[in-house]
Image (cartoon, helix red, strand yellow):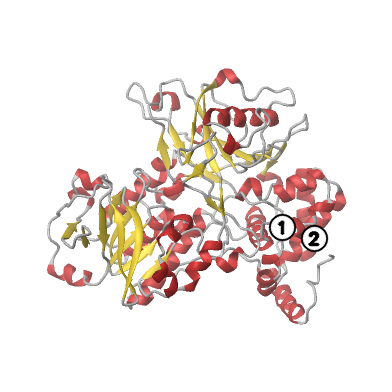
Amino acid sequence: MGSVNRMEHQCTDGKGSPRRAFLGRAAAVGGALALGAGGTAVAAPAPAGARRRRAGRTVAVLGGGVAGLTAAHELAERGFQVTVYERKPGGLGGKARSMDVPGSARGGRKPLPGEHGFRFIPGIYHNLPDTLRRIPFPGNANGCHDNLVASTEVMFARTGGREDIRLPFSMIGTPPPVLTPDAFLRMLTGLLQTATHLPAHEIAYFANRLLVFLTSCDRRRLEVWEHTPWWRFVRAASMSPDYQRLLAIGLTRNIVATKAEIASTRTVATCAEAFVFNVLGRGADGQPDRVLNLPTNEAWIDPWVAHLRSLGVAFRVGWSVRDLRLAGGRIAEAVVTDPQGARQSVVADHFVQAMPVEHARRTWNVAVRAADPQLARCDKLATDWMTGIQFYLTEPTPIIHGHINHIDSPWSLTSVGQAQYWKSRDVPADYGDGTVADCLSVDISEWDKPGILYGKTAKQCTREEIAQEVWAQMKGGLNDTGEHVLLDAKLHSWFLDPAVGGLGTPHPTNDEQLLIHPTGTWFNRPASRTAIPNLFLAGDYVAVDIDLATMEGANASARQAVNALLDASGSGAGRCTVTPLYRAPEFAALKRHDETRYRLGLPNAFDLG
């Protein structure tokens, strides 16, 4: 892992006058640049040989989320001069970051940690964990990866007095050494019988549907299952309400904010396949459910940014991309506004656009879109609201050692008690005003259905009403069997993601939405390499193997973008490893057989209709 000794990146102020910014190692950088300010900083000149090596190798990374930081990391290690432009003050890390709750610190403590949504880093991820291992962290042999801790169970919280479903991962037992179709069906059927208590015929049918997908060839997955709604694939309309809630809606709306009636079967089942094998201990980086042992910025983002600065990466925080200008078939400049609102021109040899799709496509003008038709298809990609709220409690409230799916909540809530994982922190002594002992972090995935308190959708509620509604919905699932898990007297305060605005007005907004996956979405997802030779795309909307808007997808897409950039520039540097999801070798022959059946117009051999 080489370090960049010097950075030279040319900008103009929009009137043609050049500016040069030089960046040395992090220890030599002035405080203004460390905070992402737009002023000029000068470090000691690099040796002449280093300057020659840098010629023609400047990269502007547009966006400072997981995709942008990953791209910067991979490029800096390969000797490129990288500057990251991030539009939000304090926005490095994107939707993955944690943030300070304004005005919450007292007596020398840190502010309470808020976040867009809780972190969830399952064992099916491979690319993001590889990056985590390469971020130094004091005392950790494996860097930030050692800050991952495993949850031991998951819970489905039911309402109406029904018992909640707790599923310890240890109950899975030892998987069979050779996974035949019959062994798979028996294993999955037994697991579902224990976990869901659904009728036997419904469990058998659902297990069969997963087997159909696991043994489907790639062509059938892409040409049939990508166009098939998950709701129809699992025949939810003819099943019991509990089947619909647990196995259709619970795997789509609550987890990935997509309605089961329109969600792509290929997307949902691809991740379900990976999770099943993760639970079986197959092809995984670690346990099925992992979180961080500190607030996200402390455990990951801040060490990452510090490491990138040590590699010579420069950051311009508060700089917003407005336009990409094409000349001679290449991106000649990115038009940006600096923190003071002044227009600037960013010039670089290569541009990696690592912005969320809803923001990136606003920067693609007519000329840019004409140069690459796949960019226009991105207009068809859909986003929805999946936003977090944190409740701070005055007493430890470890409901379970894992995530909770509030399966019956109108707003499709999921939550996790976080402080139980922060073993190196004394929460009252370290954060807030000294009275907060726990943090219950909740994701709201449904913003368009009425709640139980006010009869209004989340978008129609004020911020205060949202907090009261979410708290009530959680109590409806956790306190309904006579046990008082959540007590109003323990509630200290709450923090709703500031990305949502205009709540309670006719025009609510959300500045940080989530890509969702209706049928056919795959065909509108772009490749990392564009038809413009010096423009590359990274982000969770770019086509990658995991086919789901995740931090893993963002990381993998950035690796793809860097590889495409290395190819385009003729670089001899080693290419980034991009690891696909695990595929069970036992099913390879069945998938080849299904390829033949598909060409003949026949259904999958296990498809009972």
Q: In this orientation, does residue 256 appear?
A: yes
The foreground one among 53 and 425 is 53
Marks 1 and 2, Cα distance to the nearest angstrom? 14 Å
The foreground one among 427 and 224 is 224
SS at badge 2? helix
Q: For residue 99, which quarter of the picture?
A: top left
Q: In this orientation, does residue 527 appear?
A: no
- Residue 208 badge: 2
| Quadrant of image for the N terminus | bottom left
Q: Position of residue 334 (x, y in %)?
A: 31, 62
Badge 2 local density, few (<14 within 10 Å), some, or many (20+)?
many
- Residue 230 badge: 1
Q: The residue under label 2 is which amino acid type?
A: Asn
233 relative position to 96: left or right: right
Position of 571 relative to 7 (above/below): below
Q: The residue under label 1 is which amino acid type?
A: Trp
| Quadrant of image for the C terminus | bottom right
Q: Position of residue 15 (x, y in %)?
A: 19, 60
